[in-house]
Image (tube, rainbow, N blue to C red):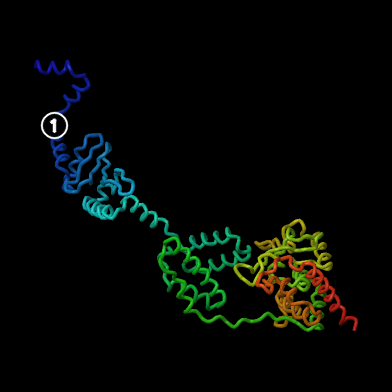
């Protein structure tokens, strides 16, 4: 009794109250838990006992026989396995949470601990190793996701025109119908082949382009360490041969060419820009796509020039990256009349019904087919017509013609001519050619 009064006098009241609540059973539990901490946990039942008898605060129990492997029990009885080690990379001590009990078992904790020791022996930090593995697994893109990344890189490079990018997007869409949702590391050659063969049954050239785009996308996957082999490469040897190229039909006889020009001029009921585009095509002999997408910002009506980047440049060594086209007075007159109609837009041949907002090349074919020139003359054929008639009928230098066609012409020393080389001579040539065409238009009519 005297001893109890002395304790009450020396110890604060709250502390006395706490000790007073502890009966003999609780003291036994505390002693048992302390013994378990000292000896270390060895069995699953011991873990359950420690959790059950946990009475607040954070406690740490060593896993017997596994130095650095511990069981952490938090105040709310949340229990996790942790591995404490010194990082071979940073030299700092780390607590690596392996998993939460009971979903993550004692046996799994021991297995992961042993794996971590193997990594540490090799100088690898287990935390970094598992983070990399987790991120790689989580970030594995599908074909469609990686294809979009590849496409955006092509757009950023500014290597291709908008319509070329859209063509590639279409090719990706073909492939994505079959393999779009598949993770790239799960796609095998038979998967790609199945897609390409299905497309091949409809059109061989498109199938070949789709395969080529797929190969580039998988090359990106290799570069980003998603895959080791390109599943699209072997498909090339399993495809049907490309059909024989059909050359663009072109009229190269003066009288027949004059009749073609008159036929184009005579149409009065064809909706759209095809007629005017073909008139320009005859005088300027540039590619269909470049004429259809002609921009007002590229045209200087006062300087009488059209400056642009040919659409088929890409990485082709035979094409210039920028071209200046001198505009004869007939073209200037036509463009001024068109400016009153579409000058408020970006494009000379504006078409608000199309996503690209300029006329589609197929309209040119339809126009000529309607006139009866299918398999006789194509829109692209104007380039061959101009080349042939200029040389044979007007005696113009082939070098000048090639420069104006946008081909990469080199001098005797192998140096490429620039875009304004012989520009005055080319200006005279273009006016001479336009005047010659006017003559062809009237020759048959006056005879």
Residue located 54% across and 59% down the image: 153
Left or right of 113, for residue 365: right
- In the picture, which quadrant includes the C terminus? bottom right
> What residue sits right under mark 1 in the picture?
27
Judging depth in this view, the residue of 189 and 429 nearest the camera is 429
Residue 271 location in percent, x, y? 76, 68
Residue occupying image coordinates x 51% and y 63%: 147
Q: Can residue 82 be seen? A: no
Q: Label 1's element?
A: helix
Q: Are there few (<14), some (14-19), or many (20+) residues within 10 Å of tag 1?
A: few
- Residue at image x 9%, y 15%? 2
Q: Is residue 23 left or right of residue 323?
A: left
Front-most of residues 117 and 272: 117
Q: Is residue 243 above or below residue 129?
A: below
Residue 250 locus on image (x, y percent): 72, 81
The single residue placed furthest to the front in the displayed view is 413
Residue 51: image x %, image y %? 21, 41
């Amino acid at each position: 009794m005297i001893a109890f009064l002395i304790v009450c006098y020396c110890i604060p009241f709250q502390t006395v109250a706490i000790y007073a609540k502890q009966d003999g059973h609780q003291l036994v539990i505390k002693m048992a838990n302390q013994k378990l901490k000292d000896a270390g946990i060895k069995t699953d039942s011991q873990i359950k006992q420690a959790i059950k008898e946990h009475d607040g605060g954070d406690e740490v129990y060593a896993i017997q026989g596994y130095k650095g492997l511990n069981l952490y029990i938090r105040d709310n009885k949340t229990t996790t396995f942790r591995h404490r080690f010194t990082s071979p990379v940073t030299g700092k001590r780390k607590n690596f949470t392996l998993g939460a009990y009971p979903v993550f078992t004692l046996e799994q904790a021991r297995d992961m601990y042993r794996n971590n020791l193997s990594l540490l022996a090799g100088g690898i930090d287990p935390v970094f190793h598992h983070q990399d593995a987790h991120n790689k697994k989580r970030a594995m893109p599908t074909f469609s996701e990686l294809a979009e990344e590849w496409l955006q890189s092509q757009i950023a490079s500014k290597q291709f025109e908008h319509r070329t990018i859209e063509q590639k997007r279409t090719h990706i869409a073909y492939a994505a119908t079959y393999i779009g949702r598949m993770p790239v590391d799960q796609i095998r050659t038979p998967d790609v082949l199945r897609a390409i063969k299905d497309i091949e049954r409809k059109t061989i050239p498109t199938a070949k382009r789709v395969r080529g785009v797929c190969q580039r996308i998988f090359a990106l996957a290799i570069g980003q360490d998603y895959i080791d082999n390109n599943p699209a490469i072997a498909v090339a040897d399993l495809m049907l041969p490309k059909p024989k190229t059909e050359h663009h039909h072109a009229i190269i006889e003066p009288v027949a060419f004059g009749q073609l020009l008159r036929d184009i001029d005579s149409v009065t009921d064809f909706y759209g820009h095809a007629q005017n585009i073909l008139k320009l095509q005859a005088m300027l002999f540039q590619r269909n796509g470049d004429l259809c997408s002609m921009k007002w910002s590229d045209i200087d009506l006062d300087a009488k020039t059209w400056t642009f980047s040919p659409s088929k440049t890409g990485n082709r060594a035979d094409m210039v990256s920028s071209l200046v086209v001198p505009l004869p007075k007939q073209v200037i007159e036509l463009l001024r009349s068109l400016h009153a109609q579409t000058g408020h837009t970006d494009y000379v041949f504006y078409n608000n019904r199309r996503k690209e907002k300029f006329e589609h090349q197929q309209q040119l074919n339809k126009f000529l087919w309607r006139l009866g020139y299918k398999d006789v003359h194509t829109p692209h054929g104007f380039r061959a017509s101009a080349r042939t008639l200029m040389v044979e009928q007007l005696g113009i230098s082939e070098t000048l013609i090639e420069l104006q066609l946008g081909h990469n012409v080199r001098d005797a020393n192998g140096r490429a001519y620039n875009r304004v080389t012989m520009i005055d001579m080319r200006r005279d040539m273009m006016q001479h050619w336009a005047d010659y065409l006017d003559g062809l238009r009237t020759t048959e009519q006056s005879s």
